[in-house]
Amino acid sequence: MASLVKISMLISRLCQFIGGISLIVIVLATIADVATRYVFKLTGGAFGFTIKGSVEIVSYFMLFALLAAFAAFVERSQIIVDVFTQKMSQTLKGHMMGVFMLGFFVISIVFAWGMYENAFDALQYGKVTQDLRISMMPIYAVSAFLSVLLAIRSLIEAIVIFKTGEFFDAEETGA
């Protein structure tokens, strides 16, 4: 059990890193885009350098950031409403959380498979992004990889919950 928890925490840290890098890229792309547009406006068009495809850059890295964040914090992903759960025992809440984690496992496997197929379709048919004209294959591949990490973490967390009965409870932590 301890090795599963260590693997889960390692995947969580990897996903936190990927999500952090993605957010940094989003911020830098946005800052550079705004700055170059402002310089373009100030010079009356004399300085013609603007960042093309910044919307694509931000949107694809936002996808990576969201998938990574969900994989990193999947055990905290359920909002428990006190009105519905205040009279439930911790055991019942734990079983519900375990079922939710298994649901996340199934959904993330389906999503990963779809992204995997899209990656091969993009490679086979030469699908490219609209503005930057780069291959969609790496975008789909990274999304599939992050979805697999989400599936692994969801399964591990479900196993831990069903074996130990312990789960992240926002009611107890005050979060």
Image: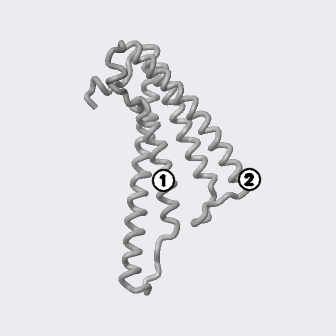
Residue sitting nearer the eye, 26 or 171: 171
Residue bearing mark 2: 124
Image x and y of residue 129, in percent: 61, 61
**Dot 2 or dot 1, earlier in sequence:** 1
Residue 92 in which image quadrant: top left
Give me the residue at 40% from left, 86% from top: 44
Cα–Cα gap, marks 2 and 1: 23 Å
Considering only vertical position in the picture, is 113 above or below 127? Answer: above
Check disc 1 and give the amino acid type: Phe
Q: Do the residues labelled 2 and 1 touch (CB within 8 Å)?
A: no
| Viewport quadrant of the N terminus | top left
Q: Which mark is residue 61?
A: 1
Give me the residue at 54% from left, 29% from top: 105
Considering only vertical position in the picture, is 128 above or below 80? Answer: below
Residue 113 in which image quadrant: top right
Considering only vertical position in the picture, is 106 above or below 90? Answer: below
Give me the residue at 41% from left, 38% from top: 13
| Viewport quadrant of the C terminus | top left
Considering only vertical position in the picture, is 144 above or below 97? Answer: below
Q: How crowded is mark 2: few (under 14 residues within 10 Å), some or many (20 or more)?
A: few
